[in-house]
Amino acid sequence: MAHTRSIVTGAAGFIGSHLAAHLIARGHEVVGIDCYDPAIKRANVAALLASPRFRLVDADLATADLGPLLAGADYVFHQAAQAGVRASWGDSFATYAHHNVLATQRLLEALTAHPPRKLVYASSSSVYGDAPLPMRETARPQPVSPYGVTKLAALDAAAEALTLEALERLRRGRTTFIIAHRLVTVRAADMIVVLEGGRIVEQGAHDVLVARGGYYRRLLDLQNGRVGHVAAAPVSA
Ligand SMILES: NC(=O)c1ccc[n+]([C@@H]2O[C@H](COP(=O)([O-])OP(=O)(O)OC[C@H]3O[C@@H](n4cnc5c(N)ncnc54)[C@H](O)[C@@H]3O)[C@@H](O)[C@H]2O)c1
């Protein structure tokens, strides 16, 4: 039986190397992509390299020919980034823009030709800036650091459009369940179910829910920057 094939970008990093190990343990065949500094990251991948189901590609997502690496992937876990808030001010911003924005944009572009079953993007609480604790995913993204700006910009409107395009292709001819907090992702769904506190509070198509002016409409306005506050956490499908 063919293995599930997963791509882990940033596979030599802290999270990516552990994620790759877990996927291999679950029987996945893993291609790790990383432009790692050998001196720092070699230890992270040493154990992974012993597995016949792991292959490490030393490549920069911002410049490499990604198509051949992504073809046939079932899942893509995009962990690669220039992490860290403090170092992101000043001259090093160009490095952050390269590894976080440009690299992600190139990965998304390449994935439109090879859409996986799922793409997981590692964001950061830094996209919410100084939002009050405990931070919620419903908080308005308002980064206060250059790092947060680049993590958010990586999924800006253009990239979001590409993601939606890929999603649309995947939905064709299938019954699809989407769990989302960005409502644009579920806009075209036949049925949107809005949960609050684990209970269904509204359901219907996008236009119906918008016209109703209820909870979904308030969330939508919040995400479009038209209102200030909505209590409690939503999930829509
Ligand atoms: N560790 C945390 O506490 C934390 C918190 C919030 C978000 N995140 C996010 O999680 C992800 C993983 O974080 P981490 O702590 O493992 O970081 P890390 O620095 O340990 O690993 C990131 C890896 O990505 C690789 N990489 C960077 N740019 C690349 C490029 N252009 N092409 C290929 N590889 C590239 C690096 O070489 C590195 O090995 C990042 O996206 C980060 O922004 C991490």
Image: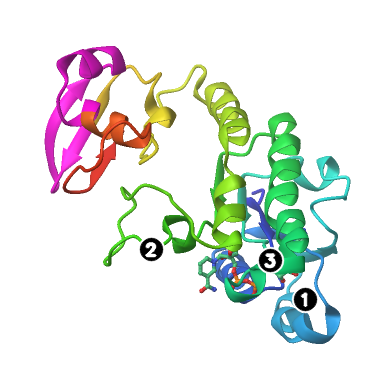
Q: In the rendered structure, which amino acid carries the disc numbered 2?
A: Asp
Q: Does the residue tagged 3 have its C-beta within 8 Å of any atom of ligand 1? A: yes
Q: Which mark is residue 49?
A: 1
Separation of marks 3 and 1 at Cα, in angstroms = 23 Å
Marks 2 and 1, the one that precedes in the sequence: 1
Q: Which residue is mark 2?
A: 130
> Position of 173 compared to 210: left or right?
right
Q: Which residue is mark 3?
A: 82
Q: Nearer the viewer, residue 56 or 12?
A: 12
Marks 3 and 1, the one that precedes in the sequence: 1
Q: Which mark is residue 142?
A: none
Q: Please tell me whether mark 2 sits on a helix, a strand or a loop.
A: loop
Question: Residue 133 lies in what quarter of the image?
Answer: bottom left
Residue 143 x %, y %: 48, 56
Q: Which residues are magenta?
A: 194-217
Q: Is residue 33 above or below residue 232?
A: below
Q: Is residue 53 visible?
A: no
State the residue at coordinates (69%, 64%): 10
Residue 83 x %, y %: 63, 69
Q: Nearer the viewer, mark 3 or mark 1?
A: 3
Instruction: Please say if the residues under marks 3 and 1 sit with CB atoms less than 8 Å apart.
Output: no
Residue 34 x %, y %: 77, 64
- Magenta span includes 187: no
Q: In the rendered structure, which amino acid carries the disc numbered 3?
A: Gln
Q: Does the residue tagged 1 have its C-beta within 8 Å of any atom of ligand 1? A: no
Q: In the rendered structure, which amino acid carries the disc numbered 1?
A: Leu
